[in-house]
Image (cartoon, rainbow, N blue to C red):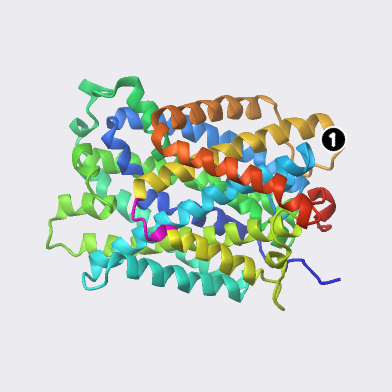
């Protein structure tokens, strides 16, 4: 029988790099679209709600990931808790999240490159960078993780530099304390939630590399907890400084908010905004690279479990799922051509929140169904997943009610995926329980 296992080469630091790297582009673009809907104070409220959710969720997710360290991540947890359909739905939600996040990030990479070199069109730059990092991911996870760690560290340095330069120039009046929620009111706060999610979107993707950790049951909690801690500090710091230095009405009109903030301070002729634009590329590339790693592993794992065609689970001699990486990346490239960054962000966050709901359900079901399952890391109090569950319901309702026209096609896509599950896999494939398909780790 052909070997379908991944190589084990990731350390806790490399996992931390993947977790932070998948997300860090959210600090460099996307979140500022929220100011079309609310004020800095209103968006701060949105961000705090989202931060509470992600912090509690990642502790809960660490328990699932260490108990079931598998490349399928959420599809494995849901498959074990709710059977094949639950696993399939979780995997599809993950693919929606990642495959829509990637073109949004790629387009922003293209915009940053175009800003620095106007002769290069945005779509051309986005496509070229996308292909380069698909190739790097095909070489092997050790190389991919090393590149991810390097660009992530550079991106973090960029955010620290931004905050250091911005803090002395904060103008308290820009926070608009006299008009706390603006014309949008409470509705604006909830409407801004998808853009607050963008600060942390894909942080759970580190679980998709769990099977490639050297010692997953020890490494995963370290990588996850350090990762979410790093991201909370960076997200809150970026929002506090950016909205304090530049009026929110101006922030919402740019695809590169951090260079724009520094340009408002140092002037158009200053080299500092140019440096921030260059460093910003590393933040965007870190997420692009990390999310390619994530969706390729999800595609591979769903194929190995029988949800997707079997050829997608073939691996190269170095243990890399090359076919899954290439095929899923070609789908992602199609969305680069749309150029609709804000809409793509909303669709991606809908997939993410759907995934989080399924994952939390899986957590509670497995606690009841398999109380004796070995859990090397265990959430100390059930208050943590309960708080996470309350928050995720708030996020889901906020996204749906404030983006009805955008969400309807996505719901239709979920309906088509469900039809595929019932009409194709059970007739042409052997769809077996994910727990049985998983290798021993």
Which region is colored magenta?
Answer: 335-340
Q: Is residue 336 left or right of residue 79?
A: left
Residue found at the very far bottom of the displayed protein: 317
**Which quadrant of the figure has residue 67?**
top right
Q: 84 or 320: which is nearer to us? A: 84
**Residue 398: image location, x then y, percent:** 45, 28
Residue at image point 76% right, 31% down: 365
Q: Is residue 81 left or right of residue 57?
A: right
The residue labelled by disc 1 is 370
Residue 339 counted in the magenta span: yes
Q: Is residue 351 left or right of residue 30?
A: right
Residue at image point 22% right, 42% down: 245
Q: 8 or 162: which is nearer to us? A: 8
The answer to whether one can see residue 379 in this image is no
Residue at image point 65% right, 29% down: 385
The answer to whether one can see residue 161 in this image is yes
**Residue 235: image location, x then y, percent:** 41, 43
Residue at image point 59% right, 73% down: 138
């Amino acid at each position: 029988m052909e070997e379908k296992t991944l190589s084990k080469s990731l350390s806790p630091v490399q996992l931390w790099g993947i977790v932070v790297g998948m997300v860090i582009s959210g600090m460099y673009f996307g979140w500022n679209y929220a100011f079309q809907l609310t004020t800095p104070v209103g968006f701060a409220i949105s961000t705090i709600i989202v931060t509470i959710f992600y912090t509690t969720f990642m502790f809960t997710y660490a328990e699932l990931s260490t108990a079931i360290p598998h490349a399928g991540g959420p599809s494995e947890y849901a498959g074990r808790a709710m059977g094949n359909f639950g696993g399939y739905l979780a995997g599809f939600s993950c693919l929606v999240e990642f495959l829509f996040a990637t073109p949004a990030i790629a387009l922003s990479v293209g915009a940053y490159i175009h800003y620095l070199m106007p002769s290069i069109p945005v779509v051309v730059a986005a496509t070229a960078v996308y292909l380069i990092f698909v190739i790097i991911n095909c070489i092997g996870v050790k190389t991919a993780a090393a590149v991810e760690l390097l660009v992530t560290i550079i991106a973090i340095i960029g955010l620290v530099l931004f905050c250091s330069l911005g803090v002395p120039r904060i103008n308290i009046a820009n926070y608009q304390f006299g008009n706390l929620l603006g014309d949008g009111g409470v509705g604006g706060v909830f409407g801004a939630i998808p853009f607050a999610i963008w600060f942390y979107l894909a942080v759970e993707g580190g679980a998709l590399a769990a099977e490639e950790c050297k010692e997953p049951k020890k490494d995963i909690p370290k990588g996850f907890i350090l990762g979410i801690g790093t991201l909370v500090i960076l997200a809150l710091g970026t929002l506090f400084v950016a909205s304090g230095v530049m009026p929110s009405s101006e922030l919402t009109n740019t695809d590169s908010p951090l260079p724009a903030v520094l340009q408002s301070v140092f002037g158009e002729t200053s080299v500092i905004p140019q440096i921030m634009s260059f460093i910003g590329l590393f933040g965007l590339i870190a997420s692009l690279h990390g999310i390619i790693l994530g969706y390729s592993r999800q595609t591979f794992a769903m194929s190995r479990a029988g949800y997707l065609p079997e050829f997608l689970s073939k691996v190269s001699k170095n243990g890399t799922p090359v076919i899954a990486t290439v095929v899923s990346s070609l789908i992602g490239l199609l969305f680069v051509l749309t150029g609709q960054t804000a809409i793509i962000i909303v669709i991606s966050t809908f997939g993410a929140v759907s995934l989080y709901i399924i994952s939390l359900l899986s957590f509670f079901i497995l606690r009841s169904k398999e109380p004796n399952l070995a859990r090397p890391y265990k959430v100390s109090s059930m208050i943590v997943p309960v708080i996470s569950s309350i928050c995720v319901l708030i996020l889901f309702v906020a996204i749906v009610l404030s983006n009805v026209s955008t969400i309807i096609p996505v719901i239709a896509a979920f309906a088509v995926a469900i039809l595929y599950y019932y009409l194709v896999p059970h007739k042409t494939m052997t769809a077996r329980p994910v727990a049985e398909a998983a290798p021993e780790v």
